[in-house]
């Protein structure tokens, strides 16, 4: 282990003494200290906290990700290029020790900087909250209500497929649809249309969502929040009136809230905790009460969610930082392995490609489910998938199999909206990114180091 | 000279006795499409015994460095094989017994000399105390003690070579592989390196070096292989290769004309012809070192490397006090002592003296009072 630490220490020294790393650190420092001073929120403390977290930590994450990948790429490929590796590999150093040392050094460096950036951001957020509350004439203790973590409860999923299947059979029986239709695709398309229909509220129409919240999770003194967001097909900046009825199936209007909300915004309604001390599912209904003909669209299943108190913000923030750290460690592994396989510029592009592939996990998932890549016409029966379609599907399924598990949750968005990052989530990503992601990359890198020549002609 | 053939008859020897053993070693560099581009080393076979200083000699591009890199596991042979200390050169634990000085400074430029040696020492798992001790001795030996905290990237080429040499010796290796060891060094440094090589050999270390500087190789090597275009063109012990056994030379102190005439008369009578008489010239290297040492005594301050000190204690043999010859060799900065009055047989070893010349041999024995011929003064 002494050899691994020595190489790790050398990697840190290399990064600290190189101008690139220094420049990134200076940029990071300036960003953390000065960006919050220039950010303009919506005037609320919540808005300020959200914007500071998303921008400050977002840019810090971006810079540190670049640093992790770039230093990773340079760690071995730079040494090979400058022949420095020749004096290391001719010592009693195994390829495993070399890879681990390089990776550990970069991970520790980036992790250390992430801890610094996170700590400074956390402290400055608290100080800013106290200052803003004092300026508003409120007690600084009010920030406690703001700095909490909340568990996100999404509505019970609705099965639209049964209705879609029935509708499809009816249309087929009526002879309105061609016989050779791809049944599964047709059902999926009809189900999506039904969902959109239910999610779109014209004037005086209503939609409802059912939430299963275990009673043990409802804390008596902590309010439950209903969070919602919606869009409108018409471009209209005017707030729209809605009536929210919250209760149970037996008493649907136990609590009523009248709101005026602008499309695109994220809003919360505080619900009294005693209202929901029930074992029944919670029923939420929204009525479009706008005084003009405009539709409200709740596009996603999580457009309306319940937020429960789930602990203090600090713990959640620490878990969020741990998630970011795991991501950095994975990126460093990507860079180090790419550097073990290719020269620096090629390694940088290969790393970038890998990071993009992981970032595009959602798109790849979508493509892996696509049967017809070239004939996308919805008129008439689509032709059977050809050889190229099948090959592409296999390709995208393969990509999704490889990169799918590494898709990350949006940690910063969750922190900014006080969403709980559960220990289970952290554990799951720890497994994906450390033993699985970094492990596979380490094996690839070590294999390459064992088989690659470390010198060349001349 | 059985070894002068390109491929040595290794099978006739006990291969386990070799520290480095190459058999039909071939290296072909390929292009991106895996097409053969250059045949850098072609069916090279040689064996190096423990305690031997073996030199690879050849012009630029003859395959010397490639052979060394194959011996270090940095390159993989295309055909044939090479074993170092009985194992594959890529065997990790075997590397703990090897020291390597590359042709170019491959050091981390952002580390100071002390940090660099500390790093390489850690890779050999040397404990802190031993590491500090060796680093101090090596810095002193290489004359870099005053520049120990300067970044290696700021070093001159010669200083980089010195620190490179120091890192190659930090593990007290059994086998030292030196690629162009005197390249970039001033004459003082060259002399010191050559003396160091002989010291190491005196301790039973094996040295494999490459050079295109004939004088360096001649000064330190026991055996050499001359490479050209990737093939061994000649190989053997220095004496075997260079000794002209048909002649010998005598070196005498300046004698009065009458005495000289008498000596020449004796020689003429023995050999039956007129001997050639000339005054020997001092070697430029010796003269240069003498001048610089005198200058150093007057101006001790220097921004570059200073004269190296003694060979690091851990690299010296235990019986150093009993080996004044070794001691004299390792003192690079000491001025060359004036030659004692003697006659020296330049090349011919005693056993190769023709037995027929018994009288001449007896005469020579009376006159010879100089250094051990193995000292390679």
Image: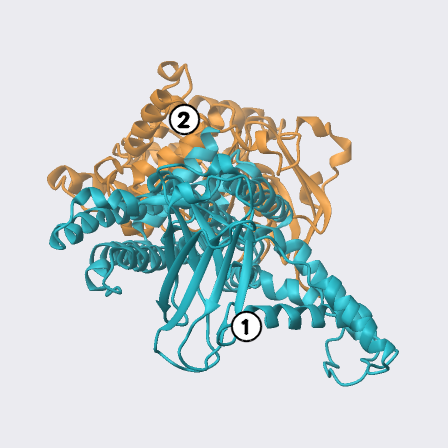
Chain colours: A cyan, B orange
Residue B172, horizontal then vertical, whole percent: 45, 27
- Assign the C terminus of chain B to one quadrant of the image: top left
Residue B329 vs A308, above or below: the answer is: above
- At horizontal 37% and vertical 21% (from top left) the residue drawn is B130
Q: Which residue is mark 2?
A: B371
* Tag 2 secondary structure: loop
* Left or right, residue A375 beside residue B176: right
Instruction: Using the image, determine if residue B68 lies above or below residue B319.
Output: below
Asked if marks 2 and 1 fall on the same chain, the answer is: no
Check disc 1 and report the residue beneath it.
A200
Residue A439 in the image: state x and y as whole percent.
59, 42
How crowded pointer 1 is (Cα within 10 Å; few <14, some 14-19, many 20+) is rated as many
Q: Chain of mark 2?
A: B
Label 1 sits on a secondary structure element that is strand
B299 with respect to B11 (left or right): left
Chain at tag 1? A
Q: Quadrant of the N terminus of chain B?
A: top right
Q: Are marks 2 and 1 in contact (CB under 8 Å)?
A: no
> From what the image shows, is residue B105 above or below residue B17?
below
Which residue is pictured at 65% across the width and 70% down the height? A194
**Of the pair A51 and A205, the residue shown nearer to us:** A205
Q: Residues within 10 Å of mark 2 (few under 14, many from 20)?
A: few
- Give residue A454's mark: none
| Residue found at the far bottom of this picture | A379
Q: Is residue A50 visible?
A: yes
Q: Position of residue A292 (x, y in %)?
A: 41, 81
Residue A352 lies, in percent from the top left, at 51, 62
| Residue toward you, B270 or A346 | A346
């Amino acid at each position: 282990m002494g050899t691994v630490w020595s190489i790790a220490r050398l990697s840190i020294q290399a990064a600290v003494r190189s101008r690139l790393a220094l420049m990134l650190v200076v940029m990071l420092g300036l960003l953390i200290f000065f960006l919050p001073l220039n950010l303009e929120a919506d005037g609320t403390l919540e808005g300020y906290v959200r914007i500071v977290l998303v921008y400050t930590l977002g840019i810090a994450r971006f810079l540190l990700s670049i640093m992790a990948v770039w230093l990773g790429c340079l760690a071995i490929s730079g040494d090979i290029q400058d022949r420095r590796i020749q004096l290391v590999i001719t010592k009693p150093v195994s390829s495993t020790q070399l890879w681990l040392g390089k990776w550990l050094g970069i991970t520790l460096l980036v992790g250390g900087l992430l801890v610094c950036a996170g700590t400074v951001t956390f402290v400055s957020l608290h100080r800013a909250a106290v200052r803003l509350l004092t300026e508003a004439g409120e007690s600084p203790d009010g920030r406690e209500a703001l700095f909490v973590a909340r568990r996100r409860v999404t509505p019970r999923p609705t099965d639209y497929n049964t209705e879609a299947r029935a509708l499809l059979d009816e249309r087929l029986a009526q002879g309105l649809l061609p016989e050779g239709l791809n049944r599964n695709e047709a059902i999926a398309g009809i189900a999506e249309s039904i969902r959109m229909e239910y999610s779109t509220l014209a004037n005086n129409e209503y939609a409802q969502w059912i939430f299963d919240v275990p009673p043990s999770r409802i804390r008596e003194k902590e309010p439950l929040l209903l969070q919602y967001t919606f869009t409108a097909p018409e471009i209209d900046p005017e707030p729209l009136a809605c009536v929210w009825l919250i209760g149970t199936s037996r008493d649907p209007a136990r609590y009523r809230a009248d709101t005026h909300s602008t499309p695109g915004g994220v809003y919360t309604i505080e619900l009294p905790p005693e209202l929901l001390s029930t074992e029944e599912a919670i029923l939420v209904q929204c009525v479009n009460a706008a005084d003009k003909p405009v539709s409200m669209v709740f596009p996603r299943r999580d457009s309306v969610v319940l937020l429960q108190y789930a602990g203090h913000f600090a713990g959640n923030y620490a878990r969020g930082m741990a998630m970011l750290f795991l991501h950095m460690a994975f990126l460093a592994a990507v860079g180090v392995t790419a550097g073990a396989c290719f020269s620096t510029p090629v390694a940088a592009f290969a790393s970038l490609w890998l990071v993009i592939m992981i970032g595009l996990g959602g798109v790849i998932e979508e493509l892996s489910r696509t049967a017809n890549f070239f004939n996308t016409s919805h008129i008439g029966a689509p032709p059977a998938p050809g050889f190229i379609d099948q090959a592409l599907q296999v390709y995208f399924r393969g990509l999704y199999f490889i990169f799918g598990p590494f898709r990350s949750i949006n940690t910063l968005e969750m922190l900014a909206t006080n969403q709980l990052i559960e220990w289970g989530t952290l554990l799951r990503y720890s497994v994906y990114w450390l033993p699985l992601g970094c492990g596979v990359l380490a094996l690839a890198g070590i294999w390459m180091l064992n088989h690659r020549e470390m010198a060349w002609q001349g | 000279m059985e070894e002068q053939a390109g491929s040595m008859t290794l099978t006739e020897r006990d291969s386990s006795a070799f520290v480095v053993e190459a058999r039909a070693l071939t290296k072909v560099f390929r292009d991106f499409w895996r097409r053969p581009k250059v045949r850098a080393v072609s069916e090279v076979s040689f064996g190096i015994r423990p305690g031997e200083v073996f030199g690879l000699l050849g012009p630029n591009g003859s395959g010397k460095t490639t052979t060394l890199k194959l011996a270090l596991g940095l390159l993989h042979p295309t055909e044939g094989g090479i074993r170092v200390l009985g194992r594959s050169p890529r065997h990790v634990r075997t590397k703990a017994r090897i020291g390597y000085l590359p042709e170019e400074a491959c050091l981390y430029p952002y580390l100071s000399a002390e940090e660099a040696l500390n790093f390489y020492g850690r890779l050999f798992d040397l404990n802190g105390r031993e590491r500090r001790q060796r680093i101090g001795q090596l810095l002193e030996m290489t004359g870099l003690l005053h520049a120990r905290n300067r970044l290696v990237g700021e070093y001159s080429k010669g200083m980089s070579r010195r620190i490179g040499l120091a890192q190659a010796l930090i593990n007290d290796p059994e086998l030292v592989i030196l690629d162009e060891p005197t390249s970039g060094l001033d004459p003082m440094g060259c002399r010191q390196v050559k003396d160091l090589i002989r010291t190491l050999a005196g301790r039973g270390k094996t040295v494999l070096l490459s050079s295109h500087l004939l004088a360096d190789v001649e000064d330190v090597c026991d055996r050499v292989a001359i490479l050209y275009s990737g093939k061994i063109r000649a190989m053997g012990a220095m004496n075997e290769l260079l000794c002209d056994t048909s002649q010998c030379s005598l070196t005498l102190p300046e004698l009065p004309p009458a005495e000289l005439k008498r000596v020449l008369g004796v020689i003429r009578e023995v050999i039956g012809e007129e001997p050639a008489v000339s005054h020997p010239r001092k070697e430029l290297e010796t003269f240069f070192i003498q001048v610089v040492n005198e200058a150093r005594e007057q101006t001790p301050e220097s921004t570059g490397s200073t004269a190296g000190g003694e060979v690091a204690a851990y690299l010296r043999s235990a019986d150093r006090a009993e080996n004044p010859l070794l001691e004299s060799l390792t003192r690079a900065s000491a001025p060359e002592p004036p030659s004692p009055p003697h006659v020296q047989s330049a090349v011919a070893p005693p056993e190769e003296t023709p037995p027929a010349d018994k009288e001449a041999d007896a005469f020579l024995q009376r006159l010879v009072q100089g250094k051990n011929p193995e000292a390679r003064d």
